[in-house]
């Protein structure tokens, strides 16, 4: 798993092994939090489209992602309903809040866009890693299949965000910034409490 985390996704620190054991005992909370993660992913892409409508490659790449993330939200809600569970209130996402603070203020619009795209890529990569853990470790066959499918999808999204960043900024600058953010993300993961009710 560590090889996948680092060599495929680029993440510098694997998830604490205790997370999946805790998550399995708190499936309702995990599913509720996951539903809101998908909703926020769709909203984030919409915000980028609204902020950068002149960037055609961005609009063209992110428009179908909005639809896909929203369909994931619907599918998670369906899993909740099948288990007689409700959506419940949204929880504060300390991981995303901390990651958002790594974005640099000032500079060109393109540099600001690069940071936002790479932060989105990190969120997708970490989600992909967590979905793989759920796929490999849950006892529920339906949820195993569900998280396998979402793992594959998130892996594609993470690569698309990096590719899009290189559409608007030099590749070497994107790669350098990506390395910086990977280290910052590892520090965030290292300091965050292992929560039983969060995807991140």
Image (spheres, grey):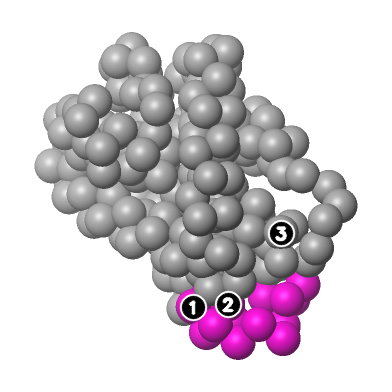
- What residue is at 39 percent from the left and 23 percent from the top? 13
Estimate the x, y position of residue 21 in percent, counting from the top left: 29, 16
Estimate the x, y position of residue 39 in percent, counting from the top left: 57, 57
Relative height, residue 156 to residue 145 (above, below): below
Choose top left, top right, bottom left or bottom right for residue 192.
Answer: top right
- What residue is at 57 percent from the left and 13 percent from the top? 191
Residue 104 badge: none
Residues at marks 2 and 1, CA–CA distance in whole angstroms: 5 Å
Choose top left, top right, bottom left or bottom right for residue 26.
Answer: top left
Tell me, yes or no, whether the two marked residues, 2 and 1, touch with CB atoms within 8 Å. Answer: yes
What residue did someone put label 1 on?
A: 61
Estimate the x, y position of residue 142 in percent, counting from the top left: 18, 47
Which span of residues is magenta-colored? 49-62
Q: Is residue 18 left or right of residue 116?
A: left
Residue 58 badge: 2
Relative height, residue 81 to residue 66 (above, below): above
């Amino acid at each position: 798993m560590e090889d996948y985390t680092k060599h495929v996704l680029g993440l510098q620190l694997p998830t604490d092994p205790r997370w999946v054991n805790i998550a399995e005992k708190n499936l309702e909370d995990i599913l509720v939090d996951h539903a809101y993660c998908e909703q926020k992913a769709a909203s984030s892409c919409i915000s980028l489209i609204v902020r950068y409508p002149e960037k055609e490659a961005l609009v063209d790449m992110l428009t179908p992602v909005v639809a896909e993330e929203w369909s994931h939200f619907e599918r998670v809600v369906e899993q909740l309903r099948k288990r007689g569970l409700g959506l419940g209130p949204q929880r504060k996402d300390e991981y995303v809040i901390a990651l958002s603070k790594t974005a640099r203020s000032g500079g060109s619009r393109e540099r600001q866009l690069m940071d936002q795209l790479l932060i989105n890529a990190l969120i997708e990569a970490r989600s992909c890693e967590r979905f793989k853990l759920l796929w490999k470790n849950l006892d529920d066959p339906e949820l195993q299949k569900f998280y396998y499918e979402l793992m594959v999808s998130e892996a594609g999204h993470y690569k698309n965000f990096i590719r899009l960043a290189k559409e608007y900024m030099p590749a070497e600058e994107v790669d350098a910034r990506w390395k910086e953010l990977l280290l910052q993300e590892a520090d965030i993961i290292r300091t965050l409490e292992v929560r039983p009710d969060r995807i991140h």
